[in-house]
Image (tube, rainbow, N blue to C red):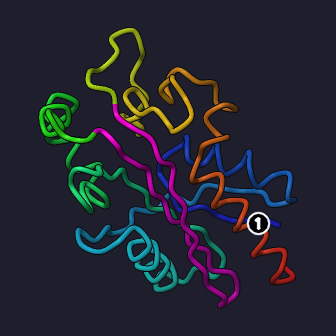
Amino acid sequence: MILPFATTNDDKLKEAERVLKPHGIEVTPLRLTLMEPDTGSIEAVAWEKLKQVCELGYERVMVDDAGIFFAAYPHFPGILTKRVFDRIGYKGILKLLEGESRQAWFEGAMGVIWDGERAVFSAKTPGRLLGKVPQNMPDEPGFPFNRIFVPDGETRTFAQMSLEEREAYSYRGQVLHRIASWLINQGI
């Protein structure tokens, strides 16, 4: 079965391909620019994206939304993660968390529509943020927090791990396995 994934992030696409292929699901890119609301939850944004792809006439597609949340600032930056990071960068993030809890979590939601059936699944990856940005690691376009995020149970940041190690903690991987089960249970 072929499942188009509405994303412009190649690394998200590759992770979806790796996780879903063993389930017999081939993920293909669907390059759409969808409007992202600036209020609400991660799940609400995924539902909104599903609504948009339906309005465009797609009957089989997967969408995604994700963000990082800081324990010191409930609900923030959340769905505004990319916009906040683009404006204040590492320097602003670290200044914002000076003297505050560094506990944080990634949260992601993925929605699927398949011939009229719709579902949204979400998961979290808890951890903490470092107090400074390691200088010996390259940036990962689309995933800037990987340089400073350490998942619970680890001493290394995501950027210091292999893809396989990282996927053991991945909220997106958890969600993708649930999507595969949902599709299979739907008899698709």
Q: Which residue is drawn at 41% across and 17% down?
A: 138
Looking at the rendered structure, the kind of residue marked 1 is Ala
Seen from this angle, which residue lies furthest bottom?
116
User: Which quarter of the rendered picture does the C terminus lie within?
Assistant: bottom right
Which range is magenta?
102-129
| Residue 144 location (% of width, % of height) | 36, 34
Depth check, front residue: 56 or 91: 91
User: Which quarter of the rendered picture does the N terminus lie within?
Assistant: bottom right
Label 1 environment density (alpha carbons within 10 Å; few <14, some 14–19, many ≥20): some
| Residue 46 location (% of width, % of height) | 45, 72
Q: Which residue is drawn at 39% across and 62% down?
A: 33
Q: Quadrant of residue 95?
A: top left
Q: Which residue is drawn at 23% across and 68% down?
A: 38
Q: Residue at x 76, y 66 (%)?
A: 180
Q: Judge whether residue 61 is colored magenta.
A: no
| Residue 102 location (% of width, % of height) | 29, 38
Answer with left or right where residue 89 lies relative to residue 133.
left
Q: Quadrant of residue 123?
A: bottom right
Q: In this view, does 118 lie above or below 99?
A: below
The residue wearing badge 1 is 180
